[in-house]
Amino acid sequence: MNVIDRFSMKGKAGVVTGAAQGLGQAMAEALASAGADIVIGEINMDLAAETAKKIAKTYGVRAEAVKCDVASPEDNQRRPTAYGPRR
């Protein structure tokens, strides 16, 4: 097994808050480049949806934008259903 295989995220999902732009987007793209499906938790849904579409097209992974304000307990209890149960 080579080093790239050791860091593969294929078959896993990465949840990144604030990933519509800036550092969060860079982190989401890094996970996607390793093969992870991406969930973008963001309050700016227009920008988040655009970023998710770009990530999915660029890296060939599933990417989803969900409304999430990390300061809101209600928002933090929701989860995307497409990625299976919480572990």
Image (cartoon, grey):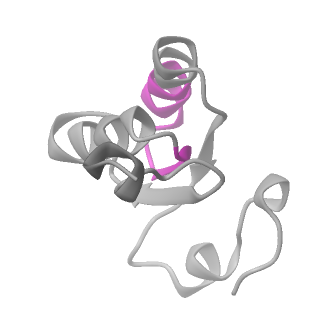
* Horizontal side of residue 42 vs 28, given as left or right: right
Which residue extends farthest front?
Answer: 1
Where on the picture, by quarter, is residue 7?
bottom left
* Horizontal side of residue 26 vs 52, given as left or right: left
Q: Which residue is drawn at 49% across and 60% down?
A: 15
In the displayed structure, 22 sits above or below 39; it is: above
Span of residues in magenta = 36-52
Return the x and y of residue 67 as percentages of the image width and height: 58, 52
Where on the picture, by quarter, is residue 17?
bottom left
Q: Which residue is drawn at 16% across and 36% down?
A: 22
Q: Quadrant where the C terminus lies? A: bottom right
Q: Which residue is drawn at 49% across and 79% down?
A: 72
- Whether the magenta-drawn stretch holds residue 15 is answered as no
Return the x and y of residue 52 as percentages of the image width and height: 53, 28
Return the x and y of residue 76 as percentages of the image width and height: 56, 78
**Towards the viewer: 15 or 33:** 33
Return the x and y of residue 48 as percentages of the image width and height: 47, 33
